[in-house]
Image: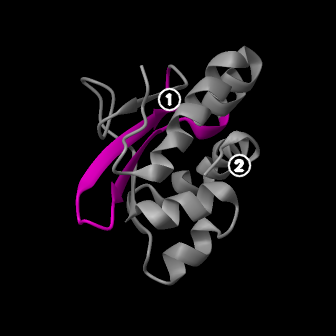
Amino acid sequence: MSLKSDSFPSSAAFDVIHSSLQSDPAGRKDAVKQGNAIFAFKLKNKEGQEEAWNIDLKEKGAVSKGEAPEGKKANVTLSLSDEDFGKMVAGKTQAQRLFMSGKLKIKGDVMKATKMEPVLKKAQTKAKL
């Protein structure tokens, strides 16, 4: 099941993150240990449409559509544009810079948001955005 949405080009990164977590059991276990949270990403495209994905680093080490896995709640919600998410995953900008400039909004445990960086770095090396 692809997580990519055609109206959100950067969403291809969620497939890459998911496959890198699934293909490396030791890495997945480490990511869950370090992340210990459910991260929601709310992206807004140029047309003003919004869509959400989540990365469960609390239990499963998996990625799915929606703000949280069924029956769960996100610990951290990151809201940003599809374009800025693409730049962040590609390593062209940093989350901290987007946050400071107001382009990235964080709800929930802000300190947990810093734990997301290593997982996004995995996508940097593999994503073709």
**The one of 121 and 8 positioned closer to us in this rendering:** 8
Q: Position of residue 91 (x, y in %)?
A: 70, 61
Q: Is residue 2 magenta?
A: no
Amino acid beneath label 1: Lys
Look at 33% across and 27% down and name the residue there: 69
Q: Position of residue 46 (x, y in %)?
A: 32, 68
* Left or right, residue 86 beside residue 26: left
Specify start and end residues of the magenta stretch as a single range: 34-59
Amino acid beneath label 2: Gln
Residue 52: quadrant of the picture = top left
Residue under label 1: 58
Residue under label 2: 124
Which disc is residue 68 wearing?
Answer: none
Q: Secondary structure at mark 1?
A: loop
* Left or right, residue 34 beside residue 49: right
Q: Residue extending furthest front?
A: 6
Look at 62% across and 54% down and name the residue there: 89
